[in-house]
Image (cartoon, helix red, strand yellow):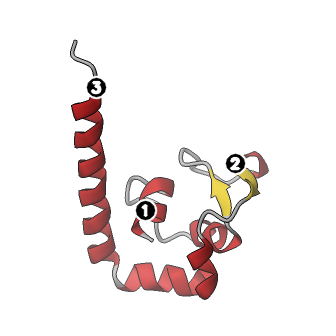
Amino acid sequence: MCNYVGEVRPSEAGRLGNVIYQTLVQNVCLSIHAHFVNPEDLCLKVDKWPWAQTHTWSGWREHYKTHKEEFDHRIRKMQKKREKKIQHNAPPE
């Protein structure tokens, strides 16, 4: 779930919204740069997160809400690790 939430909402803003968890359960792509959800922000249905079908969207939202500090900490660590990897693989200037 950290990968999904961190991908869809890189900053903490909007992580408690309903749409990101509804989208998760529906297994559709949500534009990571969308601040407001419009029909054009949604992609075709894919099975990118098959594990999401084990709970309702409100269950996933509540799980994030209950463990918000832990999730946000893990997401920040993942983002920093990803940034270091990108910097390491960048060609020298």
Give amino acid for label 3: Ala
- Depth order, front residue of 79/61: 79
For marks 2 and 1, the one nearer the N-term is: 1
How far apart marks 2 and 3 lie (CA) works out to 30 Å
As helix, strand or loop, the secondary structure at mark 3 comes to loop
Residue 64 on image: x %, y % = 42, 78
In the displayed structure, would residue 85 be above or below residue 72?
Answer: above
Please report whichever mark, 1 or 3, sits nearer to the chain's N-terminal start. 1
Image location (x, y in percent) of residue 7? 46, 54
When asked about the image quadrant of residue 33, the answer is top right
Task: Count the labels in the image.
Answer: 3
- Measured as percent of width and height from the top left, residue 11 is found at 38, 54
Which circle marks residue 3 in the picture? 1
Left or right position of 75 against 46: left
Q: Quadrant of the C terminus?
A: top left
Q: Residue furthest top?
A: 93
Please, what secondary structure does the residue beneath circle 2 have? helix
Q: Is residue 68 above or below residue 39?
A: below
